[in-house]
Image: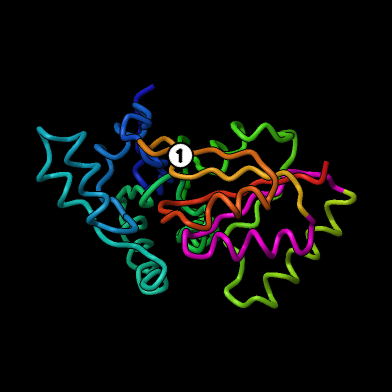
Amino acid sequence: MPVKFSNMGTLYIVATPIGNLQDITLRALETLEKADYIACEDTRVSKNLIKHYFKENEQNMLEKLFSYYEENELQKIPQVINLLLNGKNVALISDAGTPTISDPGFKLVRECIKIGIKVVPIPGPSSVIAALVTSGLPTDRFTFLGFLPQKKGHRLKILEKTWEVQKILNSTVIVFESPHKIITTLREIRQVFGNIDITVSRELTKIHEEIKCETIDNVIESSKNHNIKGEITILFNLK
């Protein structure tokens, strides 16, 4: 179906590839092309996407881009709202995957809802779902914790509370982590949950995609002497 914009501005939440550039929907491409502006997390990353898909209209597409990231979000929200109130359609994208999932954007969506601006999802890739469906863990319910807090005490407290809840809820727990903190986080999960089986997904959809389903101790041991790179998703379940 063609994308139809109303006379009033609409905010489109557009999912983009998490790695493999072929993982984008026709609707997403059409929305980006028809939008008046594209709010993106990092213009350098988004330029690569534009150059790959809009070669015939590259310059015009690049002129639509403007940065919208965590550090400038509060300053940018009024500007974006003003564009929308003046009948301009804005597409929000992140560096990878579905915007607002552990990325900036939910505050903008919340403001749009408050003042009656239409918000439309353009669904597509999500590292959370991609990791879940390839984990072999239960998919009927899951608890997404995003990135754990920086402070060790806060991280452990969240893990301890999660353990208590999981005894009742029994959902698959999903955590994001960066390469330089992965071993520390795995040790803390082990401290709370024991040496359980976990799934660690890394660089999903990319050339060096890796999915490990092992005990925490085995994952830690195999990771010690490796220069781990890329985005990492940890998944586990009590049963």
Residue toward you, 16 or 193: 193
Visible residue check, residue 16: no
Extreme top residue here? 1
Q: Which residue is mark 1?
A: 204
**Residue at screen point 32% across, 55% down:** 40
Against 134, is 83 above or below?
below
Against 187, is 26 above or below?
above
Judge whether residue 181 is colored magenta.
yes
Q: Position of residue 133 (x, y in %)?
A: 61, 32
The amino acid at mark 1 is Leu
What color scheme is it?
rainbow
Q: Position of residue 96 (x, y in %)?
A: 39, 47
Which quadrant is home to the N terminus?
Answer: top left
Visible residue check, residue 226: yes
Displayed quadrant of residue 69: bottom left
Residue toward you, 93 or 210: 210
Horizontally, residue 113 falls left or right of residue 156, namely left
**Residue at screen point 36% across, 51% down:** 95
Residue toward you, 28 or 204: 204
**Residue at screen point 47% across, 64% down:** 180
Q: Position of residue 122 (x, y in %)?
A: 44, 37
- Which secondary structure class fits the magenta region best? helix
Label 1, secondary structure: give it: loop
Against 147, is 121 above or below?
above
Judge whether residue 174 is colored magenta.
yes
Which quadrant is home to the C terminus?
Answer: top right
Displayed quadrant of residue 163: bottom right
Q: Position of residue 63 (x, y in %)?
A: 15, 52
**Residue at screen point 85% across, 47% down:** 169
* Magenta residues (range): 169-194
